[in-house]
Image: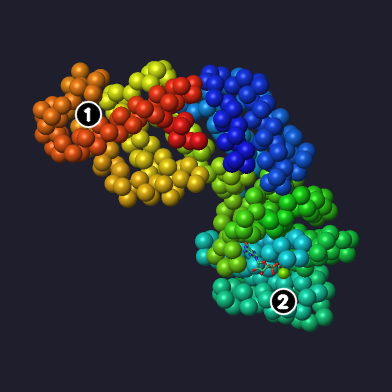
Amino acid sequence: LSERLSGVFERLTKQGALSEEDVKTALREVRVALLEADVSLPVARDFVKAVQEKATGQAVTKSVTPGQQVVKIVHDELRHVLAGDDDAPGELKIDNPPAPILMVGLQGSGKTTTTGKLAKRLKEKHGKRVLMASLDIYRPAAMDQLAVLGAQIGVDTLPIVKGQSAVDIAKRAKQQATMGGYDVYLLDTAGRLHIDDTLMGEVEAVRNVVSPRETLLVVDGLTGQDAVNVAENFDEKIGISGVVLTRMDGDGRGGAALSMRAVTGKPIKFVGLGEKMDALETFEPDRIAGRILGMGDIVALVEKAQEVVEAEQAERMMKRFQKGRFNMNDMKTQLEQMLQMGGMEGVMSMLPGMGKMAKQVQDAGFDDKTIKRQIAMIQSMTKLERANPQILQASRKKRIAAGSGMEVSDLNKLLKMQRQMADMMKKMGKMGKGGMLKQAMK
Ligand code: GDP
Ligand code: MG
């Protein structure tokens, strides 16, 4: 998506309000990208429509391109759909002990692992007494797997009794949880490779016996389209209260999250980020939205630019740049903006693929301290000198260096930089574009 959208950036360089045409062009790419990230077709279609309505006619912040602005709107909408009105994704209904939590999903989705992770979290973060029980009567090793996890994290598991049905085990778990004074009991159900009636019938029977406070659907985040069918099916037949997305440590694009949220309307509560017992995190819509967009932190950069760059000033500078003017006053403004945005390093670290360059810049000694010194040198110049840095000869240079506590060689470096910038601006002006930030974002 990143490449697609940078293509869009280049085509959308006009400034001003977002025209319908601008938005349409950008959204065509966004739609394809969503599909590539495994978002289902109807969800992608609705999504794009919602963004189109929001974006058309919106004013473009002066320092970013319309394409970037569209990305921001897309991101915000993604976040909105992903989060819904769920303002506490990691919260579970676990009052009225013992609270039953039913874990459902296909085989291999990560149910048993997630059961262990959740138990650990409830125990350590919420100070709950937790009991776990495996209802997987089909795979002989499944019950042992949960028992081993229990021992590892110090959470009790229901003693294994061979030959019982899933419903019988559920009843026993309920009884033990009540008598043993547990706050929560987690029921890890069996899965199948595909949804079938036997599986659903069994889970339904278990549900009827324990009346779970939470029924969490565990879904492999790497599966795309399929995940939506699974979610729809489980929700229809069993009724789910939330979703846990596993394997989000893998390189899946997270499109399943968006589809599932949009189709079921059920909150995504947690994401699994590895095989270890502490690799479970509260769902963060921002992070997944960024991942679906695959844009590095361009959105964050746009937001910062909106905060920092005063629109008027930016426009004035833009006009100067287009004429190829770039004197020490402009240099000072740019340096100051850079500082406000977290220094050169901060700016670059937000751009995809620029991490390495940021390090080079840092190694070259272009850090906040250097930027501040450069500003100090500019401040030691007279008005005339700032506007016409080419008049600086030896005696003026000596005075400025002394006035700012720097060496003439430092000042020469600054002057060289200013000349390079002026050259660059001249070239950019010829291309009909302006703004250092915009150029940097390509
Ligand atoms: P179940 O059949 O649904 O109970 O699935 P399991 O809990 O047995 O998990 C199947 C495999 O997926 C195991 O090897 C787990 O270690 C692995 N797994 C589960 N959750 C995650 C996760 O969030 N990230 C990664 N990388 N692996 C996971
Ligand atoms: Mg299992």
Please tell me in which quarter of the rendered image ligand 1 is found.
bottom right
Of the residues shown, which amino acid type is indicated by label 2? Met
Residue 272's tag is: none
Q: Residue 216: horizontal and vertical position, in percent? A: 70, 57
Badge 1 crowding class, 10 Å Cα cut-off, few under 14, some 14 to 19, many 20 or more, is many
* Along the line of sight, the residue nearer the viewer: 236 or 21: 21
Give the quadrant of residue 424: top left
Whole-percent x, y for residue 205 in the image: 84, 63
Q: Residue at x 73, y 66 (%)?
A: 108
Q: Would you name the residue on which mark 1 appears? A: 378
SS for callout 1: helix
Image quarter (top left, top right, bottom left or bottom right) of the N terminus: top right
Image quadrant assignment for residue 285: top right
Residue situated in front as seen by the camera: 352 or 321: 321
Picture coordinates of residue 433, whole percent (x, y): 48, 24
- Tell me residue 223's x, y (percent): 72, 55
Beta carbon of the mark 2 residue lies under 8 A of ligand 2: no
The furthest residue to the right: 197
Residue beneath label 2, please? Answer: 143
Q: Is tag 2's residue or tag 1's residue first in the polypeptide sequence? A: 2
Q: Quadrant of residue 416?
A: top left
- In the image, what residue occupies the spot 28% across and 38% down? 371
